[in-house]
Image (cartoon, grey):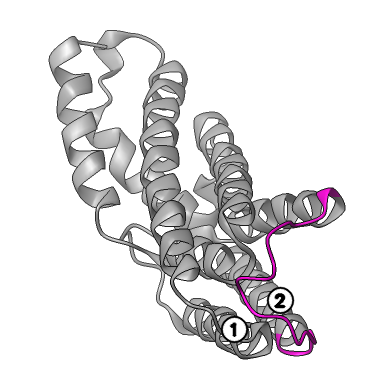
Amino acid sequence: MEFSTIWLFVIAAATLLLIPGPAVFYIMARSMNEGKKAGLVSVLGVSLGGSVHVLAGAIGVSAILMTSATAFQLVKYLGAAYLIYLGCKTLCSKSDKTTAEVTQVPRKKLIQIFYQSALVEVMNPKTALFFLAFFPQFISPASGSVSVQFLQLGAIFLLLAFISDSLYALLAASIRKRMNVNTALQNRITGYVYIVLGVFSAFASPSHSKT
């Protein structure tokens, strides 16, 4: 790929990533509820989920979501249901500690957060549609393998997204430090955020906007 094309893609992708989407709100909710480490681990999980969509797009699997309304709806509702499940689970969590008292997240919990975050992103079909709509604008068959170019653009986008999402996670963790509130209240807020994201995902139309 030409260097100028890559730079144009970087500028366009960075501009899009400045606008927070559902994944960013999910990461910030994690970070504010469970701390910086949990937020950054959720960023890693979302990045893994994004890489699955990039690989699927490169081999053409994601095209099924674009052409099959049934497949799109199935994946969308499963993802929405999972977010709502996480929200209900968080609402049911009980703790009398304050955010200042909760400093460490167990390793087992971090692993769970990682896989949950990856699953949330994998089950978001709008990410696949966004990649299929956005990447081809910077791909030229004359420059070589389309699949290889798709993977190159995907790697660049995921790196930029990782940086952007990490900054949002750190911002949320910084806000959390200044909030010495009971974690039960924070669990309720976070739980409702997950549920709202789930409902939003369920009723959102299959547009090509960034998610």
The boundaries of the magenta stretch are 91-107
Can you tell which quarter of the image residue 4 is in? top left
Disc 2 to disc 1, how far (Cα)? 14 Å
The amino acid type of the residue labelled 1 equals Gln
Q: Main secondary structure of the magenta part?
A: loop
The residue labelled by disc 1 is 186
Give left or right: position of 102 versus 94: left
Residue at 75%, 57% in the rendered image: 105
Residue at 47%, 82% in the rendered image: 200
Give left or right: position of 98 versus 60: right
User: As rendered, which of 59 and 104 lies closer to the eye?
Assistant: 104
User: As rendered, which of 52 and 35 lies closer to the eye?
Assistant: 35
Question: Which quarter of the figure is the N terminus placed in?
Answer: top left
Does 170 appear in magenta? no
The amino acid type of the residue labelled 2 equals Leu
Does 92 appear in magenta? yes
Question: Which quarter of the figure is the C terminus placed in?
Answer: bottom left
**Numbered mark located on residue 86 in the image:** 2
54 to 191, vertically: above or below = above
- Label 1, secondary structure: give it: helix
Q: Position of residue 172 (x, y in %)?
A: 44, 63
Q: Position of residue 196 (x, y in %)?
A: 51, 86
> Crowding near pointer 2: few (<14 within 10 Å), some, many (20+)?
many
